[in-house]
Image (cartoon, coloured by chain):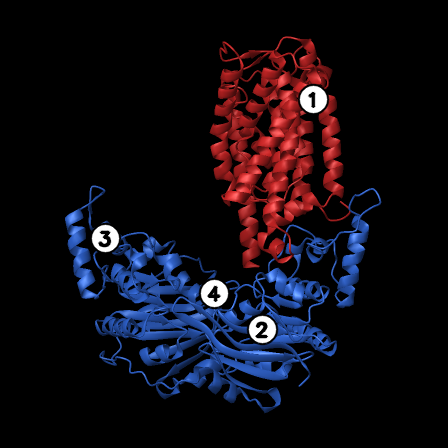
């Protein structure tokens, strides 16, 4: 990389994931039974990974600053509920999509603001948000929809356009813009600086709290786009069950992508590759005939294994640096 | 002297009841290099923190170029032209040299708004070149050597038009050639009219580099003279100052017992090197040295908190290679850490819990604490060690420093240890409690325990110890016994000027 902008360990992780994804694709091609179409695997991939990749982009920025957002799944639930309510009221599709994105942006920004004003660790605020926002969504649905029975039915096709027709396009467009922005903008570098050393930022006259908050605002935008795709892919929006565990999937992809859980290091490209790796692992297990009962356990173990390895490597390097 | 750049008038700062700096007057002229010296705890750090905007003084005035200034943050001090290079540098290790150099500055942009990385690196390279540094701007900052990090930090402050550069122990992690380079660099800055406040324990460096020397002692400026008029012995006398008027208890017999703790060529990379010592039963061995000389690290290694890379230890005649503090406790070795509040106490805990935690294993049956036994044991030890508290249920944090320290001593002494390592046992303790702790230490040695006493309080370490070992830069610089145990000898050895071992 030209400007030395990616550390060697990050670069190594990107190559490692590229190779891993390639191997998984080869594995899928080999284990695929007669009649399966490899082209279909690729075309299905876009819509399926889009929510995790997009939410992951937002999470990458947040984790780079040394913070975390555990409430993203619940934020998607609120976004989806708002979307569902507006669909029920027969708002035009475009307005419903904008409201969905806007809700996520607003809540994520609210997380950032609370962290800034209350001076509490992000993990505490967003852990509370995890429960709070899902609750808010249920209340919202119950109040707004007469005879709310736990789920909102989205029937008409035009409301499914982002998730079903344009998901891959939206994904590639957003990812491309994000990569260019990451390369040429100052803000992402500030996030890394903050995650690296809050003290240096303060000494350089930067406001650490403002930088951290900006990561939550930008993260909210990515999360909003992810939410639109997520909720327009499904027929029924059930606030109580929607997107359960999604935040862990996203954090898993981010960490797998080489972002340091303690901040200061990370890249959008890594997150995208990490999400693909997790997705292809699942696909490959399906094609290889691994029992669905085992799949979740294996995926979970994979996340633990990779995050554990990552932290161990970071710790080891830190210790080496201390002794050097 | 050149016209005054910085003027301090009767500046004072207290922390609680401790007056860290009092009524301090100091003048600094442009192009002047002033060496600031003083013992550990003399108030040097506080003074640096006041000048760099970390602390606001309680009293007095600071003026820069004749204008009164008041800094509420390090950034304000930097904007005013005072740059501080702390011993521990703050930097973003994952970012490049260029980004660190220009962090918080305006970054060059393309016409369409994106950061122009090529120009950013050109600008950074230009700034480094101005300071005659040849470092790649593309490198990750954490990949630089300690000297390079420091050089970039200095370059950074100069590019922000620093008029006064404060360096706190800048040579602590540098090799000899790097020190020479740094000095050449500072010499050049001086000729450009930058004022430098150079803080160091290394008296030889102070003599080589500075124009003037100021000496702090107990928070006061006790001497100020031109370097040409200075000698090492004069500096040492000014730093030490106070006479050994206090009487230290010595009820124990001068007879030494069996060797209890033996170290043979023990090393831990980067912390201490090739240390050998013998500690006998009934003996108090003083371990003197500057902060960062490796004394606490050595104590922790003996206690099993750090693994040693080389060398061998023996405890009570048996090979000793502990893997954790639990093994040390089981073997009859205890260690009282230097930072009482951080490493020894949960301040919210009751006095009873704080004391009994040291020997709960002896008070439990089937995993449950026998509450009555605990009450009795704690009450006894509070009486034995004269720990003054309203009740045993009072939070330990509400006790005075001296009583807290006695409680920690009680906690470990209840285990009847054979070897006791005390790290700064009387720091932040009032005079009365200090004397009691001294008596206690004397009694411990008198009853046949071996005591390793780490202390930066020179009169204390001289008064209490039978023998003194001085560490300098992680190595044994000297050993003193009998009449050779003087303040001057110890301070010279600790500063690395007394290289010959007796």
Nearest-to-viewer mark from 3 and 4: 3
Q: Nearer the viewer, residue B98 or B4?
A: B4
Q: Do marks 4 and 1 share a chain?
A: no
Point out the image quarter for the C terminus of chain B. Answer: bottom left
Q: Which mark is residue B393?
A: 3
Q: Which residue is labeled 4 in the image?
A: B267
Q: CA distance from mark 4 to mark 1?
A: 57 Å
State which chain is coloured red.
A
Q: Residue at the location (25% across, 74% down)?
A: B439
Give the letter of the chain under mark 1: A
**Image location (x, y in percent) of residue B257:** 25, 74
Q: Which residue is labeled 2 in the image?
A: B62
In the structure shown, which secondary structural element does the residue marked by tag 2 occupy? strand
Nearest-to-viewer mark from 1 and 3: 3
Q: Which residue is labeled 1 in the image?
A: A46
Give the letter of the chain under mark 3: B
Q: Quadrant of residue B162?
A: bottom right
**Image location (x, y in percent) of residue A33:** 65, 12
Q: Nearer the viewer, residue B367 or A35?
A: B367
Near mark 4 (Cα within 10 A), the count class, few <14, some 14-19 or many ≥20, is many
Q: CA distance from mark 1 to mark 3?
A: 64 Å
Q: Nearer the viewer, residue A172 or B197?
A: B197
Q: Is residue B330 above or below residue B131?
A: above
Q: CA distance from mark 2 to mark 4?
A: 46 Å
Q: CA distance from mark 3 to mark 4?
A: 43 Å
Near mark 3 (Cα within 10 A), the count class, few <14, some 14-19 or many ≥20, is few
Colour chosen for chain B: blue
In the structure shown, which secondary structural element does the residue marked by tag 1 occupy? helix
Nearest-to-viewer mark from 2 and 3: 2
Q: Nearer the viewer, residue B419 or B181?
A: B181
């Amino acid at each position: 990389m030209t400007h030395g902008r990616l550390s060697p360990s990050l670069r190594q992780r990107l190559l490692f994931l590229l190779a891993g994804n390639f191997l998984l694709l080869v594995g899928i091609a080999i284990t695929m039974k007669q009649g399966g179409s490899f082209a279909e695997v690729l075309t299905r991939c876009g819509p399926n990974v889009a929510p995790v990749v997009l939410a992951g982009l937002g999470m990458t920025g947040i984790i780079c600053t040394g913070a975390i957002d555990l409430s993203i799944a619940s934020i998607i639930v609120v976004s989806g509920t708002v979307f569902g309510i507006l669909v029920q009221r027969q708002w035009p599709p475009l307005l419903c999509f904008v409201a969905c994105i806007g809700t996520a942006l607003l809540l994520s920004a609210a997380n950032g603001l609370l962290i800034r004003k209350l001076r509490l660790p992000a993990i505490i605020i967003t852990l509370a948000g995890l429960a709070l926002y899902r609750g808010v969504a249920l209340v919202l649905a119950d109040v707004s929809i007469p005879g709310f029975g736990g789920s909102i039915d989205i029937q008409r096709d035009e409301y499914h356009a982002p998730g079903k027709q344009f998901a891959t396009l939206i994904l590639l467009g957003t990812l491309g813009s994000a990569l260019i922005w990451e390369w040429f903008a100052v803000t992402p570098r500030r996030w890394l600086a903050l995650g690296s050393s809050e003290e240096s930022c303060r000494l350089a006259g930067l406001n650490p709290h403002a930088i951290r908050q900006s990561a939550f605002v930008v993260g909210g935008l990515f999360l909003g786009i992810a939410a639109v795709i997520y909720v327009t892919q499904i027929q029924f929006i059930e606030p109580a069950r929607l997107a359960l565990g999604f935040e862990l999937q996203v954090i898993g992809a981010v960490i797998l992508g080489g972002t340091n859980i303690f901040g200061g290091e990370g890249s959008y490209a890594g997150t995208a590759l990490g999400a693909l790796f997790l997705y292809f692992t699942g696909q490959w297990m399906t094609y290889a005939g691994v029992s669905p009962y085992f799949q979740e356990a294996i995926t979970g173990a994979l996340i633990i294994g990779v995050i554990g390895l990552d932290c161990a490597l970071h710790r080891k390097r830190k210790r080496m640096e201390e002794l050097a | 002297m050149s016209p005054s750049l910085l003027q301090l008038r009767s500046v004072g700062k207290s922390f609680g009841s401790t007056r860290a700096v009092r009524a301090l007057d100091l003048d600094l002229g442009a192009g002047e290099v002033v060496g600031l010296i003083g013992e550990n705890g003399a108030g040097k750090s506080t003074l640096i923190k006041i000048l760099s905007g970390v602390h606001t003084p309680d009293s007095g005035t600071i003026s820069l170029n004749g204008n009164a200034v008041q800094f509420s943050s390090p950034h304000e001090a930097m904007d005013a032209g005072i740059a501080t290079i702390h011993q521990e540098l703050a930097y973003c290790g994952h970012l490049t040299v260029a980004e660190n150099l220009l962090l918080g500055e305006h970054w060059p942009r393309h016409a369409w708004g994106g950061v122009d990385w090529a120009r950013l690196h050109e600008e950074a390279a230009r700034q480094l070149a101005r300071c005659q540094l040849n470092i790649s701007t593309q490198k990750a900052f954490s990949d630089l050597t300690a000297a390079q990090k420091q050089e970039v930090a200095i370059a950074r402050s100069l590019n922000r038009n620093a008029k006064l550069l404060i360096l706190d122990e800048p040579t602590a992690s540098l090799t000899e050639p790097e020190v020479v380079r740094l000095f050449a660099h500072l010499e050049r800055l001086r000729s450009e009219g930058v004022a430098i406040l150079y803080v160091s324990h290394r008296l030889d460096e102070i003599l080589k580099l500075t124009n003037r020397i100021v000496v702090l002692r107990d928070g006061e400026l006790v001497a100020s003279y031109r370097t040409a008029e200075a000698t090492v012995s004069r500096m040492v006398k000014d730093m030490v100052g106070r006479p050994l008027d206090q009487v230290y208890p010595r009820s124990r017999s001068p007879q030494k017992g069996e060797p209890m703790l033996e170290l043979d060529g023990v090393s831990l990379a980067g912390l201490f090197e090739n240390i050998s010592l013998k500690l006998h039963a009934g003996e108090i061995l003083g371990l003197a040295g500057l902060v960062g000389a490796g004394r606490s690290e050595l104590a922790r290694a003996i206690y099993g908190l750090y693994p040693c890379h080389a060398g061998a230890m023996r405890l009570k005649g048996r090979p000793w290679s502990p893997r954790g503090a639990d093994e040390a406790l089981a073997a009859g070795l205890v260690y009282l850490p230097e930072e009482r509040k951080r490493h020894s106490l949960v301040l919210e805990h009751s006095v009873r819990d704080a004391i009994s935690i040291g020997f709960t294993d002896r008070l439990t049956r089937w995993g449950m604490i026998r509450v009555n036994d605990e009450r009795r044991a704690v009450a006894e030890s509070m009486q034995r060690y004269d720990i003054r508290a309203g009740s045993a249920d009072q939070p330990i944090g509400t006790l005075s420093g001296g009583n807290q320290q006695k409680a920690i001593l009680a906690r470990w002494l209840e285990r009847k240890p054979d070897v006791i390592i005390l790290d700064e046992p009387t720091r932040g303790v009032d005079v009365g409690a200090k004397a009691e702790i001294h008596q206690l230490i004397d009694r411990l040695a008198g009853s046949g325990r071996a005591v390793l006493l780490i202390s930066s309080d020179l009169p204390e370490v001289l008064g209490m110890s039978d023998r003194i070992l001085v560490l300098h830069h992680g190595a044994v610089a000297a050993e003193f016994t009998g009449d050779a145990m003087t303040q001057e000898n110890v301070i010279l050895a600790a500063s690395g000027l007394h290289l010959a071992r007796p």
